[in-house]
Image: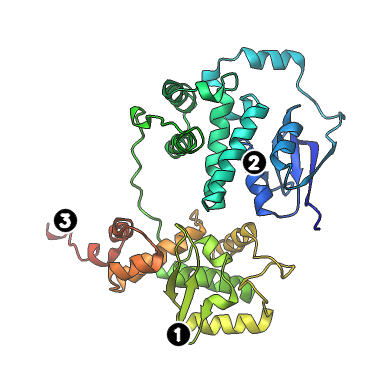
Amino acid sequence: MSLKPKVILSKILHRDLPIVKIAFERNDAITSCIRSLGNVKWSQTHKAWYVPYDTKVTKIIFELLRDKATVEFAALAPSGSPTPTNQHVNAEKKKPASISPAHKLPALSVEQIARVKSFSDWMRSRRYSESTVGTYTEALVVFFKYFQHKAVEHITNEDLIAFNNLYILANNLSASYQNQVINAVKLFFRTIQMRSMEVDLIHRPKRAKLLPNVLSKEEIKQILMSPVNIKHRALLSVIYSCGLRRSEVLNLKLTDIDSNRGLIIIRQSKGKKDRIVPLSIKIKILLDEYLVAYKPICWLFEGQDKKSRYDESSLGCVLRQALEKCKITKPVTLHWLRHSYATHLLENGTDLRYIQEILGHSRSTTTEIYTHVSNKSIQQVISPFDYL
């Protein structure tokens, strides 16, 4: 019988405010549960998740992790760290809910915690991705906190409209967050409560039509050639040369590389779909050099312990270091490499239908956005200014 993983809670100061540090070894299931707290954040300084200090937080975390981990909270005992005074607490209670930011909403009740857990368990049983489970659970937690003193059975469509107007809009929260909350609440009531919320009565924000960020081929070459470490260079090169998402490159296994056919198999990616992408000759040569040097066992790109995948935050650091070295000051993210790959394919004359298949897009309209940033046709347009 294997021992449960350990989660250690401790009270520390972070940016002059008391917080509860949540320390544990990497575990996707525990991370998802912690994220469901709603106001949890990651501290790069402390290398741990944390939430604002609250006397009820121990009980809440214990309820969330009861079946998954052993929770140690001795370090939460009163210490020299400052704690909210009674005057401060009373002042918080007097503030109207319509202007309360997320971190000042009350804690969940035991009943609400149980409802949230039922919802997350249902999503996992239907094989929703952990990212979706975490996002929807977090959104539902905030919604429940807003109606802490109202039984779930008594929450109505009018309450959802009020939450939208008095909390989301009043606090100027993003349109994407608004959609996440509405979708999460709608799914919860339809699946767990077996009743529908008329979300169409809520004025949904128009989705911003943003163009993808694209780098030039010269900039891509500078970024990919910057890392001295062959593992780092291979990581960035595979992302660009195959148009992969961050999670897709980290989830690659040695068995997913089909060198004989010149293909990489992407398994169960976004939308639970498998797909194949072409493996370029130059990438095959680079990967062969990397495999000889590092000899991975299971994952194509392994962590330091050789038993886990390469860490997401470490991959982000690899990109930042490459940008610093080649002095590119644009706010480049890993997804820019994927956008650049698709745009460069289009500029090279690749048919949109093939690009859609390679990228794993369900709809052609998603792929067509790259036609708006390709310079292949735009550069052929002559401005009338040139004829003056």
Label 3: few (<14), some or many (≥20) within 10 Å?
few
Q: Is residue 115 left or right of residue 61?
A: left
Q: Residue at x 36, y 35 (%)?
A: 205
Please give the label number shown on residue 346.
none
Q: Earlier in the sequence, mark 1 or mark 3?
A: 1
Secondary structure at numbered mark 3: helix
Amino acid, disc 3: Phe
Label 1: few (<14), some or many (≥20) within 10 Å?
few
Q: Nearer the viewer, mark 2 or mark 1?
A: 1
Q: Is residue 357 above or below residue 19?
A: below
Q: Nearer the viewer, mark 1 or mark 3?
A: 1
Which residue position holds label 3? 385
How far apart marks 2 and 1 lie (CA) works out to 44 Å
Q: x, y (%) of residue 218?
A: 43, 70
How far apart marks 1 and 3 lie (CA) works out to 51 Å
Q: x, y (%) of residue 35?
A: 62, 42
Q: Is residue 118 left or right of residue 274?
A: right
Residue lying furthest front: 194
Q: Residue at x 32, y 60 (%)?
A: 367
Which residue position holds label 1? 261
Which residue position holds label 2? 41
Amino acid, disc 1: Arg
Frontmost residue, 303 versus 376: 303
Secondary structure at numbered mark 2: strand
Secondary structure at numbered mark 1: loop
Residue lying furthest bottom: 260
Q: Is residue 367 above or below residue 358?
A: above
Quadrant in the rendering for residue 86 = top right
Q: Say which quadrant the C terminus sits in.
A: bottom left
Q: Earlier in the sequence, mark 2 or mark 3?
A: 2
